[in-house]
Image: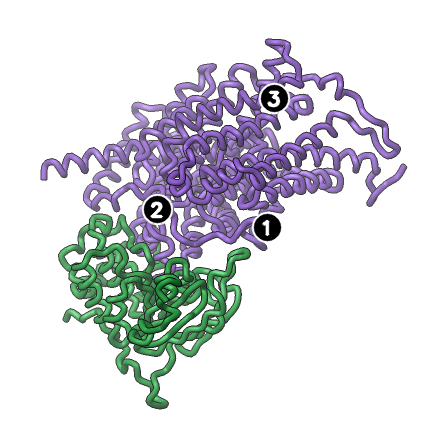
Chain colours: A purple, B green
Amino acid sequence: MVTIFGVPAAALYGQLLVGLINGSFYALLSLGLAVIFGMLNVINVAHGAMYMLGAFAAWFLLHMFGISYWWALGLAPIAVALVGVVIERTTLRRVAHLDHLYGFLLTLGLAMVIEGLFRYWYGSSGQPYAIPSALAGGIKLPFMFLPIYRVWVVVVSLVVCLATWLVIERTHIGAHLRAATENAVLSQAFGLNVPLLVTLTYAGGVALAGLAGVLAAPIYQVSPLMGSNLIIVVFAVVVVGGMGSILGSIVTGYLLGIVEGMTRVYYPEASSIVIFVIMVVVLMLRPAGLFGREKDSAANASPPIGATQATGMDDKWAAIGALGVVAALIAAPALVYPVFLMKLMCFALFAAAFNLLIGFVGLLSFGHAAFFGSGAYIAAYAAKVWHLDPLLCVLAGTATGAVLGLLFGALAIRRSGIYFAMITLALAQMVYFIALQAPFTGGEDGIQDVPRGMLFGVLDLQHPVAMYGFVMAVFVVGMAVLWRVVRSPFGQVLKAIRENEARAISLGYDVQRFKLKAFVISAALAGAAGGTKALVFQLASLTDVTWQMSGDVVLMTLMGGIGTMLGPVVGAAVVVSLENALAGLEFPITVLIGAIFIACVLLFRRGIVGEVQQWFARLSRVSN
Amino acid sequence: MPVSGLSSMRGNPAGDERGDAPAVMLKATSLTKRFGGFTALDRFDLSVRQGAIHALIGPNGAGKTTAFNLLTKFHEPSEGHIVFDGEDVTALRPAAVSRKGLVRSFQISATFLQLTVLENVRIALQRRAGLADQFWRSDRVLTTLDARARALLADVNLDGFAGRLAVDLSYGRRRALELATTIALDPKMLLLDEPMAGLGHEDIQAIVALVRKVAVGRTVLMVEHNLSVVSDLCDTITVLQHGKVIAEGGYAAIAGDARVREAYLGTEAA
């Protein structure tokens, strides 16, 4: 048997082919993302859902109408494109004038609704889709068995990618597209129908994802969640390639697919994270991406996220509010189930920590679950294996969050805006895979039966009242820290950076250092919240590090009111209550959460607390 | 004792201990910026004397703002060197350039819109007062900067607006606020990018007076399209076209230069 570096040649070629297949999907998806981003300035988080829709469309066509694969290759992308038209016309268009992050959140909500519904209808397990007979079987080469369908996928993807590139770079339509991308207002003045072009671009971009879905259907099973994990890898691909170049995203897609395949041969444990590791290296060496253009440091024209709020309430009201919250927390266990209240406090602190970044620095971190979850794992481990004092366990969780925050932050602040969100998401996904595989995290089981321990060796936290008091103390101290940070000389500089980063630089501030510091504080408190949660539920599990958890905390903050002190607390209360109330129902909670996301982005960007503040402000203006 | 904030505390304007000729405050040598295949600025040489009010003019797209972005390191030059106050600053980051005393303004007025007028000026004062990094102290400590901030605001006639949000100010007043914020750093040199852009006639008079006032004891380099302002304020003018310097000198010399007329008016007028 022929071996290459100690690996049988057949296995090597086999993985090379798998790598090329994955690379094809990365290329098709990142190409669509790049085209959409170029025109709409939106990172289409729903891209994974569109890929899934493409696969399902092929499956429906076959099983309901008996329409073959060959027709589906054309019809399914068209169907997905039509969905895209509806999405663009009804929702995306309405956030076009806002910070790009709103487009990110909106498409995230759409992805949650679409994927949640399909999961509700079809379950998590996949539906098989047979390889069309003309492409079944394989060719026996001297060194390996070559399945025809896989070759077909690679060839079709390559042809479609290159054709798309040619259309954009070499044709009349492409010229219009590039003109509108460069300067939409001017192009409109010259008679281009820019709104139509925007719709068609979005439809075209998602159609590419739909096509990828059809191609994938016979290889992977047709499943509702096939796109949701893929999309995060594609984000990493996009960060590595840089979205400035169409050809660049194609090349990067194939390249990373092959690298991933080779890793599976030589070091299988790392294959799920290798793309993320490459992303980290590229960010350190060439932050703009392999094919990225030098970015303009000019300030963003749209108002930053979180900047709609006035500077805040006065101290008297703040003190009254704080006392009210503490009084309510002391009285609440008489009326509400204490474990629920403790859960709520953990998530409220988590959301408030997250809000420090989005509300006061204008940074959307989409990886905060990594800090929360790692804090939970370390605290649980410290309690169960090291038998540490519960306070030390929570502090260990806090320290873990801080260290991880320093690492994430140092990498992510090299890019701003939407890239920052994608990088934090990708880094957090890496932490997820590590948690899945590392020996001490307990894999799918997590760390169970975590002892709550004796506080200072005397107070048994197994007692509900003692535990409640402990959690409340952590919550109040955490909130007080956040309050101090926001209302400090440092907090004042953060607000200035949020308002106008370029101006802050020109006044001599190293804004990166300030952002990093805020990031570490936020991550540390998220770790504290996670550590406390692990003691409350006596469990640290994979749920705590999923991207859905990161999404939850974004939603809590958005819903409660970005940039307000009380908003994240209120948002956490609403979301946790909803999750509790719906836990018994069959209806998937993600659909509801996604729908709320969409509603918040489209209708209530100020959030609950923000709307109330606005209402009071209007009242006082009228009475003046 | 309300200190007047505007004039420099450095004293000895335009002086040079070695001789009669004023020292060079800012010197750019062969500064070049290429974006892909496009050369936005081509071997740009500039020498600004200490104490001068120097104008950088030229038609749209001539490379004026690019020059500013390079001089303040907001963009990385493809080639060339920048020496400021006798020190090579080519390798510094933009915030560090600012801390050396070379502070820029922006074409679109740059204020912190959701902060109050007083807070805007205080942000600039905070760094020099060492009150920027403390996240554990109450922001009440910042009131120690209020007297100085109010004096600066009084100098730009904004003393009545201290408690307003910057977003509620008129465009002209935002320009004044921006100037007060810049002066709060007590810079050695100011780079003003079209300080009169978007202003009405009366506002222009006010800002011209302010620029003249803040220029005492400092060096100013400004990009400006309004040539009557330039002739009024500036002692030296550098004209850029297509990324290259085509003329330099006093207003009269520049106004009479055939190449400059051609650049502005097209070939027919030459």
Q: What is the chain identity of the residue bearing mark 1? A: A
Looking at the image, can residue A186 be seen?
Answer: yes
Q: Nearer the viewer, residue B181 or B27?
A: B27
**Dot 1: few (<14), some (14–19), or many (≥20) neighbours within 10 Å?**
some
At 22% across and 43% down in the image, what residue appears?
A: A313
The residue at the point 80 percent across, 29 percent down is: A146
Query: Type of residue at label 3?
Result: Gly
Front residue of A619/B65: it is B65
Local SS, label 1: helix
Along the viewing direction, whichever of A233 and A577 lies nearer the viewer: A233
Residue position for label 3: A74
Provide the secondary structure element on which disc 2 rests.
helix
- Asked if A608 appears above or below A361 in the picture, the reply is above
Residue type indicated by callout 2: Phe
Residue A12, numbered label? none
Residue A593 percent across, percent down from the top left = 42, 25
Query: Which residue does the numbered mark 1 point to in the structure image?
Result: A282
> Which chain is home to disc 2?
A
Q: Are marks 3 and 1 on the same chain?
A: yes
Q: Residue A51 location, x and y as percent? A: 57, 27
Q: Residue furthest top?
A: A65
